[in-house]
Amino acid sequence: MDENKILAVIGRIHRSGNRFIERELKKHHIHGIAPSHGDILYQLFIREDITMNQLSSSIDKDKSTITALVDKLVRLDYVKREQDRTDGRIYRLSLTAKGRELQPIFEEVSAALLAAVYEGFDPEEKQQLIGLLERIRL
C-alpha cells in the first residue's frame, strides 16, 4: 500500500466533487455560484439570519474569504447584508427570495452527490469511512 497517496486521493475526491456540483448547478441554469458558496448558503438555509462572525465560526473560514464569497452572493441577489440595528459594526446576512429558491435545488444536488460518493458502499462501510476520515487531524 502506498501510504503517500492519501492526500492525492482526498484531493482528487474534492476536485471531482466540485466538478460534479458545478455540472449539476448548470443543469438547473444556476451560474455564478461556486461550490465554495455552498457552506454559506447551507448556513442561511438552516438559519433565518446570521452575522459574519457566526458564519466564519460555523464554516471554519476566515472573514476575508467569507467577505469575498458573500459579496458575490449579494451581487447575484441571493443574499442580503444589513447592518445590525443595535450594533452598527455588525452585519447580518439573510437569503433573498431568489436565494431561498436555491434550497430545493441544493438539496437535490447534495443528495445526488452523496449517492455518487457512496455508490457501492454498504451502511457499515459508510460509517467506517466517515470514522476513519474524521480521525485525520491537520
Image (cartoon, rainbow, N blue to C red):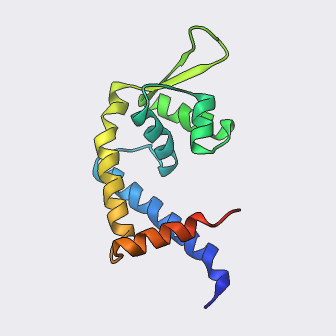
Whether residue 4 is visible, yes or no, is yes
Q: Nearer the viewer, residue 59 or 12?
A: 59
Q: Position of residue 5 (x, y in %)?
A: 62, 81
Look at 47% across and 48% down and name the residue there: 34
In the rendered image, the residue lying farthest to the right is: 138
In the picture shown, does residue 136 fall above or below 74? Answer: below
Q: Position of residue 135 (x, y in %)?
A: 61, 66
Whether residue 29 is visible, yes or no, is no
Q: Position of residue 9 (x, y in %)?
A: 56, 75
Q: How many marks?
A: 0
Quarter of the figure with residue 137 = bottom right
Indicate the quadrant containing the N terminus: top left, top right, bottom left or bottom right.
Answer: bottom right
In the picture shown, does residue 12 fall above or below 23? Answer: below
In the picture shown, does residue 86 fall above or below 63? Answer: above
Drawn side of residue 2 relative to residue 13, left or right: right
Look at 34% across and 32% down and name the residue there: 100
Drawn side of residue 15 relative to residue 60, left or right: left
Indicate the quadrant containing the C terminus: top left, top right, bottom left or bottom right.
Answer: bottom right
In the rendered image, the residue lying farthest to the top is: 86
Quarter of the figure with residue 8 = bottom right
Drawn side of residue 85 relative to residue 114, left or right: right
In the rendered image, the residue lying farthest to the front is: 124
Look at 59% across and 20% down and name the residue there: 91
Look at 44% across and 41% down and name the residue there: 42
Q: Position of residue 16 (x, y in %)?
A: 46, 67
